[in-house]
Image: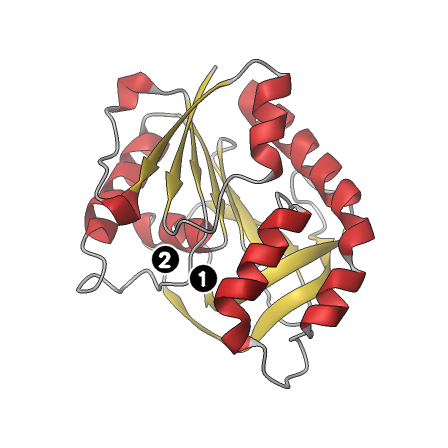
Amino acid sequence: MRLHWLQHVPFEGLGYIEEWALVRGVEISCSQLFAGEKIPALKSFDALVVMGGPMGIYDHEEHPWLVEEKESIKQAIDAGKAVLGICLGAQLMADALGAKVYPGPQKEIGWFPIQRVAGAPELLPEALTVFHWHGDTFDLPEGAVRLASSKACLNQGFVYKGRAVGLQFHMETTPKNMAALIENCGHELADAPFIQTAEQMNAGLPSIGTINSAMAQLLDTLMRA
């Protein structure tokens, strides 16, 4: 199995997904889009992971590589590759599949519970407290199935044709990943109903093992599909 991933900023890496891949002997390669690296041809990988970032999916003027990236994501999905998008990655997937992406009613930053939607594929536990850091949201692409919801965000995830999964939240988070987000995006930590302080987020660190296990189960299922 060859997994290629797309990185939008230096401080958002694969997190636990890298450990998962190494344990299973999955070959990893990366395109650092912020550094001008190109996305390789479809034949060079079996699975694609699209990570997060602080930019919006329509910020083409500042980040012109977003246009080509969305085209590549659509091509990978159409080719039947296993595709996983996380946060910005899920929003890029939704846009590539023709759905609207827009600012959510409120930002969701910190540890908050999600619930798997009744009848959705069992890629997630029925209920799980996960790590969030997002302000935008998306409509469901045509043909996609809603995977999960939270109080702050109706569409926390979707599944498209069984092989493409978009997650608004983070299950790949490690202590290092979370610290990097707080350091680089801490200016977003305003006083709001669904935004935690850095101290509150650090208090949630014991949940990392649980969300990493859930990520491993999701990846195992997706890669077998």
Instruction: Please give left or right for residue 6 compared with residue 27 in the image.
Output: left
Q: Tell me where residue 50 appears, x and y as whole percent.
A: 42, 42
Instruction: Please give left or right for residue 182 compared with residue 8 in the image.
Output: right
Q: Which residue is mark 1?
A: 139
Q: Is residue 225 above or below residue 133?
A: above
Q: Residues within 10 Å of mark 1 (few under 14, many from 20)?
A: some
* Amino acid found under the numbered disc labelled 1: Asp
Q: Residues within 10 Å of mark 2 (few under 14, many from 20)?
A: some
Q: Which residue is located at x 49 percent, y 43 percent? A: 13
Task: State whether residue 213 appears in this view.
Answer: yes
Q: Which residue is located at x 64 percent, y 86 percent? A: 191
Q: Are the residues tagged 2 and 1 within 8 Å (C-beta)?
A: yes
Q: Secondary structure at mark 1?
A: loop
Closer-to-camera residue (39/221): 39
Q: Which residue is located at x 37 percent, y 32 percent? A: 30
Q: Tell me where residue 31 appears, x and y as whole percent.
A: 32, 35
Q: Which residue is located at x 64 percent, y 18 percent? A: 23
Marks 2/1: CA–CA distance:
6 Å
Instruction: Look at the image and name its color scheme.
Output: secondary structure
Circle number at residue 67: none
Circle number at residue 99: 2
* Amino acid found under the numbered disc labelled 2: Ala
Q: Tell me where residue 187 appears, x and y as whole percent.
A: 51, 77
